[in-house]
Image (cartoon, rainbow, N blue to C red):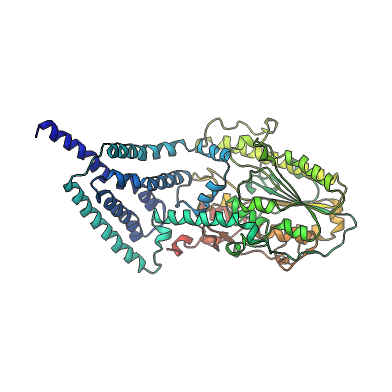
């Protein structure tokens, strides 16, 4: 054999050997990062690193042509890349079920706004995994093979590491807390979450069939000489701390602060930091404890008002996305999604839509629900230029160094929301009828508020900034006369602890004088018998867990204590579900 032939064989086997050792190491990068970010015990950290590493080594050394095995692991590389990007974004946690649902229900424009601010994270995962994929393709096309010596070495090391990982897993399983690999072991946990997200998405698509026979048995128990109008306005990504009505130092609510008949509830928390769960909670009689069983087979507040004889309206500045929110809204008598035309719209356009809908309905009792785009990132795109009161706005991507500019733009969105709400109220007053409006946001937002440098919302674990939301009730003078004592009751309850997820439905139907078996007076903020809620959080597995065990950190407990919501920090929730 010629020397050149020997060299050719050597090179022919070098790349498969590199792939055999390199790809398993690349694939456990997210495992190592999760061992750093998550509060795993030492046995759990060892399992999370060793067991996948051993399995990957076995897969890469089973066949001489291991490029085929490398190609089969591309889905795992994609999950690993997704996980690393998530850790860049939130600093902790596995890819949650809700994250997958966000991918399925978020519109393309909204997603592109986020991706534009994840350049470093995306570049990192491309540098990690793209070369491995390219080299695997080269090895596959050139039919490169592992030497028998390298293959046996890989099998021996892979088998040993796998056996060690299994042994430690058994030790972890026998510990006092047990061990749940489906929630703790990457990528098994993420794969399980992806399957669960698919199941929930399919359940949502079957909503109309599953809810066909549902009825509130709702009836209007009071008579009104003049047909009233009730409006629910659902905000997006609004933080209560940035509202002047709640004591914020900046004048972000100049119009609402001058308007009579407003009651703000500053101690309001949402039980979810994701739109696709928080909005159905706001619009329904079920709560976090019954969400898993009831969400896909119950109907919404729109149906409750319709059963009681009200004409119903749904106006949205969000896109259709095959979610419960769309399906709830589509059952209204008048339905309009501004984004159906494919263009971007500002929330003020909803006001003229409401005026037109009220004119077309005429003198009948009306319930309207309006879903705004509010303060969703990118903040600068949520308001017109004449509302850029707080300057300068950010000129570059989201970064802790740009926080002051981001806050300026964010506060401008609140200023614009103030104008939108005031315009809705003016439109309602112009009808000359008793009218009331309830506004609340689905969730809040992180804007690099503390040392964690968290940004955006819908993270697998919540923060104070993501769950502290604005909530206000407005009643015009005619409504205050038509419902004597109700306004004073709301004022008496304004300093109390509130769950928007629990109280929105019951407050509105009680105010409207609607009776139904599901109505809970103790959850209504216009009821003298209002009872403060247990503080719970609807987690990724649709389990209502105590807020203290939801994953909040010391920074969050400090802010809650400052708000007057005292929750004792306890062992994190995920340590209870191993």
Q: How many marks?
A: 0
Look at the picture and state if 376 lies above or below 548: above
Residue at the far right in the pictured view:
225
Is residue 116 visible in this depiction of the protein? yes
Q: Is residue 481 left or right of residue 348?
A: right
Q: Nearer the viewer, residue 485 or 428?
A: 428
- Quadrant of the drawing holding the N terminus: top left
Look at the picture and state if 212 lies above or below 248: below
Residue at x 81%, y 59% (from the top left corner): 309
Residue 573 position, x and y percent, is 48, 61
Residue 84 position, x and y percent, is 42, 45
Q: Quadrant of residue 48?
A: bottom left
Residue 73 position, x and y percent, is 35, 47
Q: Is residue 334 left or right of residue 457?
A: right
Is residue 572 visible in this depiction of the protein? no
Q: Quadrant of residue 211?
A: bottom right
Residue at x 68%, y 56% (from the top left corner): 283
Residue 330 position, x and y percent, is 69, 51
Residue at x 17%, y 37% (from the top left corner): 9
Q: Is residue 103 left or right of residue 477?
A: left
Residue at the far left in the pictured view:
1
Q: Nearer the viewer, residue 307 or 148?
A: 148
Q: Nearer the viewer, residue 207 or 295?
A: 207
Look at the picture and state if 469 lies above or below 382: below
- Quadrant of the drawing holding the C terminus: bottom left
């Amino acid at each position: 054999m010629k020397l050149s032939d020997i060299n050719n064989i050597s090179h022919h086997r070098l790349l498969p050997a590199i792939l055999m050792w390199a790809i398993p190491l690349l694939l456990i990068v997210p495992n190592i990062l999760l061992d750093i970010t998550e509060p795993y015990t030492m046995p759990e950290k060892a399992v999370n690193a060793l067991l996948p590493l051993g399995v990957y080594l076995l897969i890469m050394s089973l066949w001489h042509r291991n490029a085929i095995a490398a190609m089969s692991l591309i889905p795992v590389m994609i999950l690993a890349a997704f996980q690393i990007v998530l850790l860049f974004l939130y600093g902790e946690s596995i890819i949650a079920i809700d994250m997958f649902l966000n991918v399925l229900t978020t519109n393309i424009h909204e997603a592109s706004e986020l991706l534009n601010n994840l350049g470093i994270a995306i570049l990192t995962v491309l540098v990690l995994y793209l070369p491995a994929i390219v080299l695997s393709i080269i090895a596959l096309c050139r039919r490169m093979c592992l030497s028998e010596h390298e293959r046996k070495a890989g099998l021996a090391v892979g088998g040993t590491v796998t056996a060690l990982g299994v042994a430690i897993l058994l030790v972890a399983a026998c510990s006092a807390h047990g061990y749940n690999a489906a929630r703790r072991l990457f990528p098994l946990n993420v794969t399980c979450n992806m399957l669960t997200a698919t199941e929930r998405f399919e359940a949502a698509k079957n909503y109309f069939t599953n809810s066909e026979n549902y009825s509130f048995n709702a009836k209007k128990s009071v008579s009104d000489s003049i047909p009233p109008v009730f409006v629910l306005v659902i905000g997006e990504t609004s933080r209560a701390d940035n509202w002047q009505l709640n004591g914020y130092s900046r004048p972000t609510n100049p119009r609402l602060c001058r308007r009579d008949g407003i009651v703000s509830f500053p101690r309001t928390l949402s039980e979810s930091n994701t739109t696709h769960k928080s909005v159905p909670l706001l619009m329904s009689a079920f709560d976090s404890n019954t969400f898993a069983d009831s969400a896909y087979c119950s109907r919404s507040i729109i149906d409750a008002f319709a059963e009681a004889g009200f004409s119903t309206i749904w106006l949205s500045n969000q896109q259709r996305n095959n979610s419960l929110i769309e399906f709830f809204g589509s059952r209204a008598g008048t339905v309009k999604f501004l984004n159906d035309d494919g263009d971007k719209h500002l929330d003020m356009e909803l006001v003229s839509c409401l005026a037109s809908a009220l004119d077309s309905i005429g003198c009948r009792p009306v319930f309207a629900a309006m879903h705004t785009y509010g303060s969703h990132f990118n903040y600068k795109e949520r308001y017109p230029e004449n509302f850029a009161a707080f300057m300068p706005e950010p000129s570059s991507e989201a970064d802790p160094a740009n926080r002051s500019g981001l806050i300026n733009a964010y506060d401008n969105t609140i200023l614009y929301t103030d104008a939108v709400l005031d315009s809705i109220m003016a439109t309602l007053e112009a009808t000359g009828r008793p009218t009331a409006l309830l506004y609340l946001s689905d969730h809040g937002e992180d804007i690099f508020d503390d040392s964690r440098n968290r940004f955006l919302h819908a993270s697998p674990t919540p923060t104070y900034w993501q769950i502290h939301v604005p909530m206000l009730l407005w009643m015009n003078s005619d409504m205050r006369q038509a419902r004597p004592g109700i306004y004073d009751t709301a004022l008496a309850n304004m300093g109390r602890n509130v769950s928007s997820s629990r109280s929105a439905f019951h407050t509105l139907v009680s105010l409207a004088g609607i009776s139904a078996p599901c109505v809970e007076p103790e959850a209504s903020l216009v009821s003298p018998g209002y009872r403060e809620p247990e503080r719970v959080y609807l987690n990724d597995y649709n389990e209502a867990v105590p807020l203290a065990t939801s994953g909040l950190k010391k920074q969050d407990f400090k802010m809650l204590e400052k708000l007057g919501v005292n929750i004792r920090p306890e062992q994190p929730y995920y340590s209870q579900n191993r």
